[in-house]
Amino acid sequence: MIRSKLPDVGTTIFTVMSRLAIEHQAINLGQGFPDFDPDPRLCELVTKAMAAGHNQYPYMPGVAALREAIAEKIRGLYGHAYDPETEITVTSGATEALMATVLAAVNSGDEVVVIEPCYDSYLPAIRLAGGTAVPVPLRAPTAQDPYYRIDWQRVRDAITSRTRLLMLNFPHNPTGAVLEESDLDALESIVRDTGVLLLSDEVYEHIVFDGKPHASLSRRPLLAEHAFVISSFGKTYHATGWKMGYCCAPRQLSAELRKVHQFMVFTVSTPMQVALAEYMRDPKPYMELPAFYQAKRERLAEGLRQTRFKPLPSPGTFFMLADYSAISSQSEAEFAKWLTMEHGVTVIPVSAFYQRPDEEASNHGLVRFCFAKKDGTLDQAIERLRGV
């Protein structure tokens, strides 16, 4: 028998709900990926790269042209100059970057502060590194203030002499919350006083709405000096199945990350890296992404207002939360399963993003909808939800 390193980790809620969606022929607004293809030009560039012979292992940290394109983008958007040779690493999706960062930074006995609700890979990564997760919950929305918000005093109070890493994810999955400049001020104060390292999961950096800029940690020199900043080509270019991401960090931190990266995957797809480097020459696709998804956000929100669901504001990401208290008093997990089986629309319970999903403190009567879908898919889902 193998002694499990993750004894209480089973099939994720995303797999469970997607399987239910298939079994009941439901419209899947649960799992966070588009049901439409990337730009045909990007796919053509991959084919072109293959035909040009870019089919063997690239340099371990990533194709030079792609790392240079990433550095140029960050310099232009956020004003920080990462050295593409020593401070940018191309990874097998953001999830590998997350795992490699945690394994590189966290040792046995270290504590890692995580903001709940949080993406499902965070807690297993911490455990595999021998660390202990210290959850700090976001303040849940209220009738007077329908936004999730971070309590920086609670974050500060959670940091001890054993804390090695603080994990952040903004724009935030699943709540859609974004950081303001005042949040960066508060975080700077904490870093200045504690020296804690930061992991900043910014995969939705280009999906921030209502004209607001993304508050990347790389905007602030002090934060950038302490941070592993992670992003995803999959989220930006509608190509989640390509599993292409990257991590930017100061030279010393990147050196440790690369030690882990080279023995996890060594390197990632050569033709896709070459294609992405060429595609990034034009900033238009990511600069126009907020407007593209804001239209879908409004479509879903307007549709939900015609049902008994109450949509919450979504400042960023391609997710929207909705309150179902007018429909049911079931727990979030039970309601999500019931909605799939009885009404043919699949969502994700927000409680699944907490360390203890079954506790009352993790259930606020909210489910997550993904609006990274074709308009027709959203319209069909809304039609079904009108009957709930």
Image: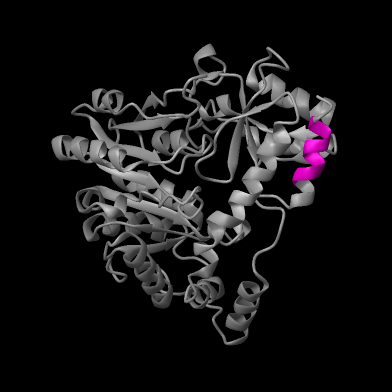
**Position of residue 353 in the picture relative to residue 169 (left or right):** right
Q: Is residue 180 magenta?
A: no
Q: Residue at 74%, 51% (x, y): give it.
A: 375
Classify 387 as above or below 251: above
Classify 201 as above or below 346: below
Q: Is residue 379 magenta?
A: yes
| Residue 370 x, y percent position in the rendering | 64, 42
Magenta stretch: dominant SS?
helix
Picture quadrant of residue 349:
top right
Classify 117 as above or below 67: above
Color style of the picture: one colour
Quadrant (top left, top right, bottom left, bottom right) of the C terminus: top right
**Position of residue 189 in the picture relative to residue 182 (left or right):** left
Q: Residue at 49%, 23% (x, y): give it.
A: 141
Residue 305 in view (yes/no)? yes
Q: Residue at 25%, 32% (x, y): give it.
A: 163
Which span of residues is magenta-colored?
378-385
Question: Among all residues in the image, which is located at the extreme left?
Answer: 193
**Position of residue 258 in the picture relative to residue 3 (left or right):** left
Residue 235 in view (yes/no)? no
| Residue 258 x, y percent position in the rendering | 34, 59
| Residue 243 x, y percent position in the rendering | 56, 58
| Residue 127 x, y percent position in the rendering | 41, 33
Quadrant (top left, top right, bottom left, bottom right) of the N terminus: top right
